[in-house]
Image (tube, rainbow, N blue to C red):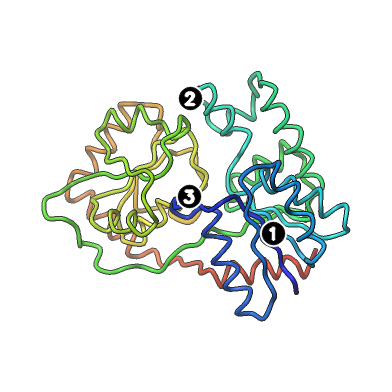
Amino acid sequence: MKILITTGLGRSDIGGPFQYAHNLEREFKILGHKVRVAKYGSVESSIVGVWPKVIWADRILALDTFSVGLPSVLAAKIFGKKVTIRVGGDFLWSAYVNRTGEAITLPAFYRNMPKLNMKEKFIFFFTKFTTKRADFLAFNTEWQRSIWQSFYKIKEGRSGVVRNFIPEKRGDPQVRLAGNKNFIWAGRLIPEKNPRMLKKFDIDIVTGESHEKVLEKLKNSYAAVSLAFTDICPNFIIEAASFNKPFIMTRETGLNEILPKGGIFVDSLDESAVRGAIEALLDDNTYNKHVEDLKSNTAMHSWSDLAKEFLDIWKKT
């Protein structure tokens, strides 16, 4: 099979689409398939650039719903190709929250959609367009799939869940800097990540670092934190759990489908709830209980597993 993977331009952020593209490329090749990765910086560049590559491909895997998802769907339909979109986030909700700074969760956004500007209306229109025309939508959580299934009226059999990469456990869970009870967050510091709350509680904020440096900081941390308004299935927390580091996590997430224990889920808009969660984890007995819960969770989802699951989807669609 000839597989085209379309993705945004490379970034160093942990677990980003660029990493997914190159790890899946490797696994598909191991299984005997021909693979090309096409990287684009904008919708405009991908509309022009993706079409010649689509002609070559048997299957297209787009690693987001909009910047490469839309051009991939357009080209696939013109040339009669099959396209699968990996839904790893929500481009429309992100665009709105990061423009307005409004503290609105993903479910609340779709229950009562606020007034959108012209750019967001454009995103909304073409998100509906791509969801109706993609051959398959691969979500990383059932939580988000159910939200989209209801709102975008996705037909049965045209969507499913392909979990994020879940690494195997790494080393001694008690390895950390002696006496250093630091809480860490990593990623892009944008409004949806609730930076005000992160800064209020003196969380160590890591941004712009390579994947390798983030992993090293996680290894030497006390706990990981995500206080985003919504964080669908953060790779950063999954990576922290691989070191058996407890976490504090927004309850607006699908992460609890794979990590039901090992951390504290909170209303990330409630300052007192966040404070209570931090104080709870500072207690050694509570902390050690979460460590033990993480040690007992042996969930793993390799890049090979992901590649095989996409191939299984393509056998049926």
Residue 171 in the image: x percent, y percent?
28, 69
Q: Which of marks 3 and 2 is nearer the N terminus?
A: 2
Kindly report the distance in space between the C-alpha atoms of the residues bearing marks 3 and 2. 20 Å
Q: In this view, does 125 lie to the left or right of 64?
A: right
Q: Earlier in the sequence, mark 1 or mark 3?
A: 1
The three-letter amino acid code for the residue at tag 1 is Leu
Tell me the tag on residue 103. 2
Of badges 1 and 3, nearer the viewer stands: 1
Of badges 2 and 1, nearer the viewer stands: 1
The three-letter amino acid code for the residue at tag 3 is Leu
The three-letter amino acid code for the residue at tag 2 is Ala
Structural crowding at the residue carrying mark 2, measured as other residues with C-alpha within 10 Å and reported as few (<14), some (14–19) or many (≥20) = some
**Residue underneath mark 3:** 255
- Disc 2 + disc 1, Cβ < 8 Å: no
**Residue underneath mark 1:** 61
Structural crowding at the residue carrying mark 3, measured as other residues with C-alpha within 10 Å and reported as few (<14), some (14–19) or many (≥20) = many
Name the image quarter holding residue 238.
bottom left
- Disc 3 + disc 2, Cβ < 8 Å: no
Residue 215 in the image: x percent, y percent?
33, 58
Q: In this view, does 232 lie to the left or right of 284?
A: right
Q: Nearer the viewer, residue 112 or 20?
A: 20
Q: Which of 211 and 198 is in front in this view?
A: 211
Q: In which quarter of the image is the C terminus?
A: bottom right
Q: What element carries label 3?
A: helix
Q: Which of marks 2 and 1 is nearer the N terminus?
A: 1
Look at 64% across and 42% down and name the residue there: 42
Name the image quarter holding residue 1.
bottom right
Q: Is mark 2 on a helix, strand or loop?
A: loop
Residue sitting at the far left: 179
